[in-house]
Amino acid sequence: MRLGVLDIGSNTVNLLVVDAHTGARPVTSVSERSVVRLMRFLEPDGSISAQGVGELEQAIRRARAVADEQAVDALVTIATSALRDARNGADLIRRIETISGVPLQVLDGPEEARLTFLAIRRWFGWSAGEILMIDIGGGSLEIAAGPDEAPAVALSLPFGAGRLTMSHLMPDDPPRPERLAALAEFLDEHLGTARDMMTGRPAPDHVVGSSKTIRSLAKLAGHALPGWAGNERLVLSRARLKDWIPRMAAMSADARQNLPGITPERTYQIVGGALVLNATMKALGVAELEVSPWALREGVLLRYLDTVG
């Protein structure tokens, strides 16, 4: 069976096409990505501007064309915080469904955390024991923990890398030191919910980071260990992350794309993402995390296979 997941996020529109069947590991056929950065198009009233709507529609059309070329048997379309929080989200959903030809599932924050956690559990396996997951998107931060496929706790907070970059660090490039300090203080003050969520829970056997932001930071500041089935296993320490934050913050966005692991579409928000990750690891008492190659899209595919199998 050839399946596609179209993920409409705050930063990118991603199409993942895999060949899969129940009980087998999905094998990627095509991964198509369009950079949209919807957070750039937020109006003062919380709606996405006409220009943003136009760019989003173009990205959906491209993804639909690729899905048709790949002859997918089923296409699952999901949206996360950018559409979930937009004032004109209902209109955008109708437009997207018209273009894609399939219903759009708008995931709430906890469900986004649960699906990402499912992918991580399947990747690491039952022997991984208690897992603590941190996922940083463009619009939100998800945290989940537990010993099973469904997390015992799942939390979503509006602390995405793009959202906080727009609200706290822009328009300066590089960001001013006082803005960096204010964002760090803001995060320390508001991550108490995450810290309280972990109170009384078993110590994690694995702390796992998921998302392009965390993977980029791990390629920059982390190190690689022998992985599974040829996949690079990336590990990132908070000490190394902290060391890189002021160095990245002193650069312009254009200069950051020359750093290892920092792709052009993430240069403008990578400092904000690094501050979020550092503050989250600090709040949860995490000294080091591993990076999962699977994330939300794989979780959506696995859940779909579970339901049709």
Image (spheres, rainbow, N blue to C red):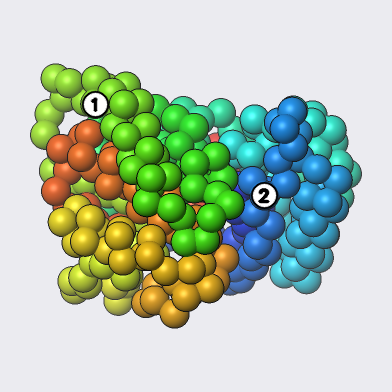
| Left or right: 88, with 256 as reference point | right
Nearer the observer, disc 1 or disc 2? Answer: 2
| Left or right: 202, with 42 as reference point | left
Q: Earlier in the sequence, mark 1 or mark 2?
A: 2
Residue 48 position within the rendered picture, expressed as x and y whole percent measured from the top left: 76, 40
Mark 1 is on which residue type?
Arg
Mark 2 crowd level (few <14, some 14–19, many ≥20, 10 Å Cα): some
Camera-side residue: 188 or 199? Answer: 188
Q: Which residue is located at x 56 percent, y 28 percent?
A: 108
Q: Which residue is mark 2?
A: 40
Q: Secondary structure at mark 2?
A: helix
Camera-side residue: 36 or 227? Answer: 36
- For residue 62, which numbered disc appears in the image? none
Q: Is residue 166 visible?
A: yes
Residue 270 position within the rendered picture, expressed as x and y whole percent measured from the top left: 44, 58
Q: Which residue is mark 1?
A: 195
Camera-side residue: 117 or 198? Answer: 198
Residue 51 position within the rendered picture, expressed as x and y whole percent measured from the top left: 83, 51
Mark 1 crowd level (few <14, some 14–19, many ≥20, 10 Å Cα): some
| Left or right: 139, with 143 as reference point | right
Q: Which residue is located at x 79 percent, y 31 percent?
A: 88
Q: Which residue is located at x 31 percent, y 66 percent?
A: 247
Mark 2 is on which residue type?
Arg
Q: Quadrant of the C terminus?
A: top right
